[in-house]
Image (cartoon, coloured by chain):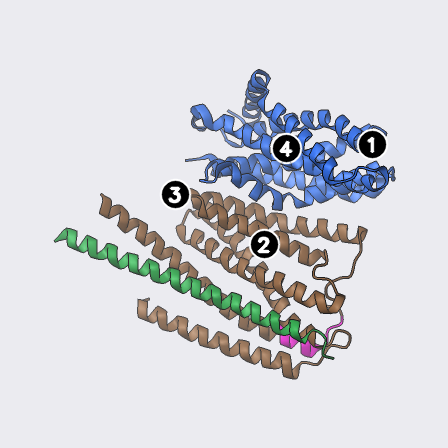
Amino acid sequence: MEIGLKHLFYAFAIVWVLLLGYVFSLARRQKQLADELETLKKALGRRSN
Amino acid sequence: MSESARHRLALVLLAVALLVIVSAWYYAFQVAPTERTMGTIQRIFYLHLPAAFLSFLAFFVVFVASVAYLTTRRMGWDWAAASAAEVGVVFCAAVLITGPLWAKPVWGIWWTWDARLTTTLILFLIYVAYLMLRLYVTDSERRARLAAVVGILGFVDVPLVYMANRWWRTQHPEPVIAGGEGSGLDPRMWWGVLWAFAGLLTFASLLFFQRYRMEAMRAELTQLARRLRA
Amino acid sequence: MDTGRVTLAVFRKDLLAERRTKEVFTAVLLFGFTVSVAFTFAFEPTSAEARKITGGLLWLAFLFSAVLGLNRAFARETSNQCLQGLRLIPADLGGVYLGKLASNLLFLLLAELVLLPPFGVFFDLTLWARPGWLLLILVLGTWGLAALGTMFSAVSANTRMQELMLPLLLLPLTVPVLIAAIESTVILLEGRPMSEAALWLKLLTGFDIVFTLLCWLLFDFVVQE
């Protein structure tokens, strides 16, 4: 039976977009934090010199 | 664990997760039998049910971590609670999206006030409120404390929400969203669900650890910033 | 200083403060009244249909005005640094929670009771057929709202969003209270035997006891510094 094949496709598609979107959001936020940490560490390094 | 080692572990976990998920879905689409009454759309079940389990598991972790934080005051528990809550909300959203997409072709309506789906909706609102609370408290110690309290109260509420919805449903009956939810399931379908659950669990754990790492980095950042200002 | 004495002391303090200013009671009453009027515009209060939804409308009016009142009630603590003062008491802060819960419950109940007659007039209801049951439902339902509401007003006072945080937290978590109170009220208004509401009233009682105990235990964590 073919009822809802379109809905099935959309369901999986949307959920994967959601999950991968979250992965990217995490990656982006983590990169931001890592960059800020780098900057701060360098600033502290300069201060002690 | 060094940064590069952690990075490699994350990649390995991701690979494993994707492998399990892909094979789970091969199973779901090829091997598992077609459901008698609903047909193909029923395969949404292999996404809907594991996601529901996962979000519930995540919120349970929030509860445990909240209690642990209040008793030990170790920030690690707060980081765990925050991470679990975010992952839980994401999977909760997945449940709320797949629910209507399942209901529409089968019962013709987008939403049924079925007890499980309604409870999931309320759960979603509770933990979104939890995340907003975390967002709007600046001091990390206070945030941890308040979030922990809400984390505990929220989880204790869940069975009560479910019961209220169940009884309300029996008073105002309407089609139930899944005739197949645990009632007379073909054993091959159960394997499909289990396998899909395993895959999504691995994936969710990965998300959890990444998010946890983020909290740790944020704490380090605040500490360094404080030293800089001093 | 033991919990009982702290509870009583806080309760009396709130009563005294309220008697002077009457802010919480007035706010809840007026807002509830306005909401009820707004409902008459939104929902045709013709008798047949009305009885089905007025139970729900009544509790929505109570809920919205309770949020207002609870915010106001806690704001009284944060102004003039009452809270810091309270923290200095060498006593268990749980008593503060119980005292505030009691005073909030009282003010909300009084406002609700005053709100009922006009509500009944607007929606052409016979409210007083079984006053004992009505009162029971009101007490149990409002207790549930106040139990979590008192807790969350303390929580939200500590956030940048302040009063906005309270409804965000309160509404989802008090869904069981709302459903149970609304169902019981509908049964009452429709003249059906109250035995049908037994399950709901038990749920309400359970909710009230569980969350009052839990909030009493956790309150320290919210107000300590």
Residue marked by disc 3: B139
Q: Nearer the viewer, mark 1 or mark 4?
A: 1
Query: Marks 4 and 3, Cα distance to the nearest angstrom?
Result: 31 Å
Chain B: its colour in the image is: brown
Residue type indicated by callout 3: Asp
Quadrant of the image containing the C terminus of chain C: top left
Q: Nearer the viewer, mark 1 or mark 2?
A: 1
Residue marked by disc 1: C124
Which element type, helix, strand or loop, lies under badge 3?
loop
> Which is more N-terminal, label 3 or label 2?
2
> Which chain can be seen in blue?
C
Residue marked by disc 4: C65
Quarter of image, res C87: top left
Q: How many marks?
A: 4
| Magenta region, residue range | B184-193
Quarter of image, res C211: top right
